[in-house]
Image (cartoon, rainbow, N blue to C red):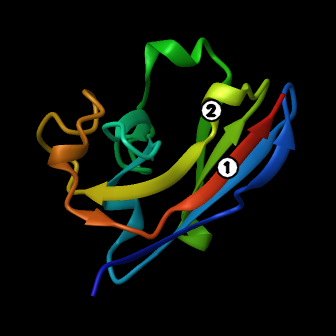
Amino acid sequence: EVQLQASGGGLVQAGGSLRLSCAGSGFTFGDYAIGWFRQVPGKEREGIACMFGAKDGSTYYAKFLKGRFTVSSDNAKNTVYLQMNSLEPMDTALYYCAATPPYGSACPTLNYHGMDYWGKGTLVTVSS
């Protein structure tokens, strides 16, 4: 059974940093594309970043991030990280990680509709 668990959320002041973790099990981690998404109540879920298979290592980022977030992975720990720097109040959201086999356009286009497996979200709150 494929399982994903996001963690590392919390309360941080504007300008601060957080690192989210996405731990996976039940699948060969390096063979899947792992994406990060976020959602604010009442708004559509939006794509943030995606690593196109840890063995490949290609990463894709939403343009609005302006280089503030970085995805990395530790295959030995079956974990993908999202390092978030220069956080802004507008980054406040529930953050999710998701996985999909590394073919198709879901990862490069950060299309949440194309992701197959989802973990529970972790809440990030950025105060002004």
Q: Quadrant of residue 62?
A: top left
The percent coordinates of residue 25 (x first, y second) are: 42, 80
Describe residue 19's horizontal placement relative to residue 22 as left or right: right
* The residue positioned farthest toward the left in the image shown: 104
Label 1 and label 2: CA atoms lie apart by 8 Å
Lower position in the chain sequence, tag 1 or tag 2: 2
Height in image: 122 above or below 40? below
The residue located at (86%, 25%) in the rendering is 15
* Amino acid type at image mark 1: Val
Describe residue 56's horizontal placement relative to residue 65 as left or right: left
Find disc 2 in the rendering and name its residue: 91
* Amino acid type at image mark 2: Asp
Q: CB atoms at circles 1 and 2 under 8 Å apart?
A: yes
Q: Quadrant of residue 75?
A: bottom right
Figure quadrant of the C terminus? top right
Residue 124: which numbered mark, if any?
1
Describe residue 105's horizontal placement relative to residue 84 as left or right: left
The residue located at (37%, 42%) in the rendering is 42
Q: What crowding class fits label 1: few (fewer than 14 Cα within 10 Å), some (14-19), or many (20 or more)?
A: many
What element does badge 2 sit on?
helix
